[in-house]
Image (cartoon, grey):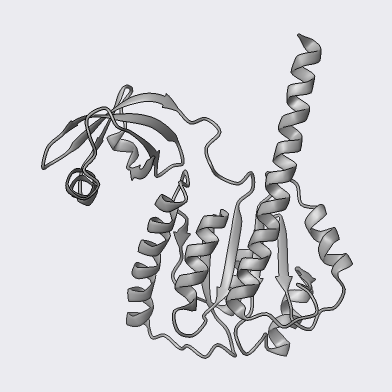
Amino acid sequence: MYQFFADDAQIGKDFITITGPDVNHMKNVLRLKMGEQVRISSRSGRSFLCSVLEMTDAFVQLDILDSDIAGTELPSEIYLFQALPKGERMEYVIQKAVELGVHEIIPVAMKYCVVKLDEKKAQARQKRWQAIAESAAKQSKRSRIPQIHPVMNFGEAAAYARQCDRCLVPYENERGMKQTAGALAGICPGESISVFIGPEGGFAEEEIGALRGQMQVISLGRRILRTDTAAIAIMSALMLHLETEAEKTAGQDKSIDSSIT
């Protein structure tokens, strides 16, 4: 089943009207047929099961069959603060983090980042990164498209990260997985989580010192991970923990409902 996104203004009580570039994609690339079912998500995170009702060169009208109440989002919002990596690694991080359920991605310019972007290049990269996030959201059937922020400096990023309920900093020189396991186990569904990933050159002493005083510094094992690997590793661990806890809660709710009945 194909996935598309629509603005809230395009969603009515019984019908959804798709306009713009997706019309050509649905009509001439995918060649959707009348009555074929698709999944539509709004920019605000609502999702619907729909069937194709009418297609023209200007719009596609869809009949709303049902609403997807559960959706596909994680039960917590994860904010990934990713130090700017070299080459195409940022694109890889964005694609995989979106698949794993990230809520927002904040590119961060740190002291030892190899890549240095001027304002013009940063704006062009952000536009491309947002398009990659949208494509990954469609592919993984997300209920919303994660936002890719403009590049922040270290101070701006640290201040934004501290607004979350939990703040994790995987650090290559930290030792002991017991603290990591405890940090993950202590996270409850519904809490917001920030994750701060350092660059290829590692955190500068003053950077990790500033974060250590305000966030939870953890280890990802005895091996040194590349910056993109570290991002995917912690995102995977968080996804597994949050999905497992959500299923436990859902199972307990069902047991309570059964006992009441």
Query: In this picture, is 225 found above or below 182?
Result: below
Q: Residue furthest left?
A: 57
- Residue 187 in percent (x, y) is at 76, 52
Residue drawn at x 70%, y 40% as measured from the top left: 246
Q: Residue furthest top?
A: 261
Asked if 70 appears above or below 25 in the picture, the reply is: above
Where residue 24 sits in the image (x, y, percent)? Answer: 18, 48
Which quadrant of the figure contains the N terminus? top left
Q: Quadrant of the C terminus?
A: top right
Query: Is 8 drawn above or below residue 106 in the view shown?
Result: above
115 horizontally vs 244: left or right: left
Q: Residue at x 72, y 75 (%)?
A: 211
Choose top left, top right, bottom left or bottom right for residue 37: top left
Left or right relative to 134: residue 81: right
Residue drawn at point x = 45 percent, y = 58 percent: 147
Q: On screen, 158 above or below 14?
A: below
Q: Residue at x 52, y 69 (%)?
A: 93
Q: Is residue 216 left or right of residue 42?
A: right
Q: Quadrant of residue 196?
A: bottom right
